[in-house]
Image (spheres, rainbow, N blue to C red):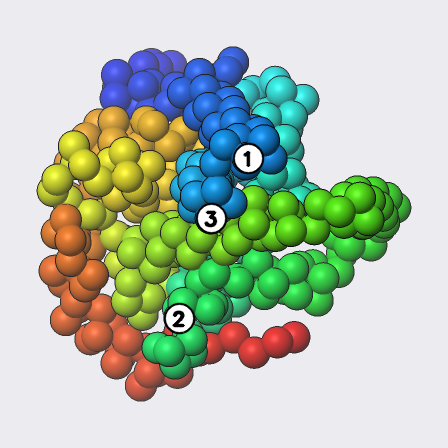
Amino acid sequence: MATHAPAPSETLLREYMRAPLLAIPTALLAVLMLGGMAAVWYLCLSGRMSFWAGALINGLLSYGLFSPIHDGAHRAISRIGWLNETIADVSLLFLFPYAPMVALRWLHNQHHIHANGAQDPDRFEHDGPGWQAPLRWAFFDLWYIWYFFTRGQHLVKKHRKELIAFYSCLALAVGTLIALGYGYELFMLWFIPTRISLFLIALVFVILPHHPAMVSHHEDPYLATTMRMGWEWLLTPLLVYQNYHLIHHLYPTVPFYKMHRVWYLRYDEHARHNVSYQTAFALEPQNIELHRKFQATAGVTGNGSAAPLSPA
């Protein structure tokens, strides 16, 4: 029987999708962000930097820390399990210490499965009156925790002992720091920075790449997630490659710093579909009318995807 070798592009795609032994850029980003945060704590505690400056800088650093966490949730930092989990968990501890990886990974997978649909946990950021947007974006972690404990009961039961131990240790650590008189420092150098980073994460990973959130991934993945084209020299580092967010939803295990390569590697395949292109600084995709038509058709047939979430 004749066999056919895979095309070079297919072989390369498989290589991109396979977790590396260690994703050096991702690991370095985690080390740099964590090191920067440690430096900010030292400078503020020693009186060499104001707490408000520290809050702002830590907010930006913890935004940068989300990419290693995000890739770790997809097991894309390292094919060595304990190494992937260690880098992701340590990073997670300084951003969402109350959301262990078992919770974050499940929540993020729910987003991938239901992107833009009624069961997508990220609908919390898309829905609601406009005046609520800043609050929803800066406090979406509260909704995520609610979503996990109400809709992820199978995982809560499976990991009950680990979760009890985890939250007990966390409460003890935070309580001890507050009792020792470090409540203000925690508020200024962790709580305020995480509100800044959550706002940026919601904007960069949720709002910009999924607007107008009218079509679910089930209905059409090329309409559900966008490609932001232009000014790549500026936007690619600022958005940490999330201007190529469509690639992440098509190939979730590709490390963030390789998404642009996959876009061009599979360009002909992607171009056959209704890719939702946004220009560099636009919010609406260029094919916005197609989104509206799709939503109108879905509404007529009763299959609309963007019904707001209500608490379970």
Give the secondary structure at mark 2. helix
Q: Quadrant of the N terminus?
A: top left
Horizontal placement of 44 versus 279: left or right?
Answer: right
Farthest front residue in view: 47
Nearest the eye: 246 or 66: 66
Nearest the eye: 209 or 63: 63
- To which residue does mark 3 refer? 52
x, y percent for residue 49: 48, 36
Q: Quadrant of the C terminus?
A: bottom right
Nearest the eye: 74 or 305: 74
Check disc 3 and give the amino acid type. Answer: Trp
Q: Is residue 197 above or below residue 1?
A: below
Farthest bottom residue in view: 300
Q: CB of mark 1 within 8 Å of CB of mark 3?
A: no
Check disc 1 and give the amino acid type. Answer: Gly
- To which residue does mark 1 refer? 47
Instruction: Determine which of the numbered discs, if any, sits on residue 133 in the image.
Output: 2
Q: Earlier in the sequence, mark 1 or mark 2?
A: 1
Q: Earlier in the sequence, mark 3 or mark 2?
A: 3
Horizontal placement of 167 versus 84: left or right?
Answer: right
Determine the residue positioned at 34% across, 28% down.
257
x, y percent for residue 5: 32, 14
| Mark 2 closeness class: few <14, some 14–19, many ≥20 residues within 10 Å | some
Nearest the eye: 166 or 8: 166
Quarter holding residue 75 = top right
x, y percent for residue 139: 53, 63
x, y percent for residue 200: 39, 52
Give the secondary structure at mark 3. helix
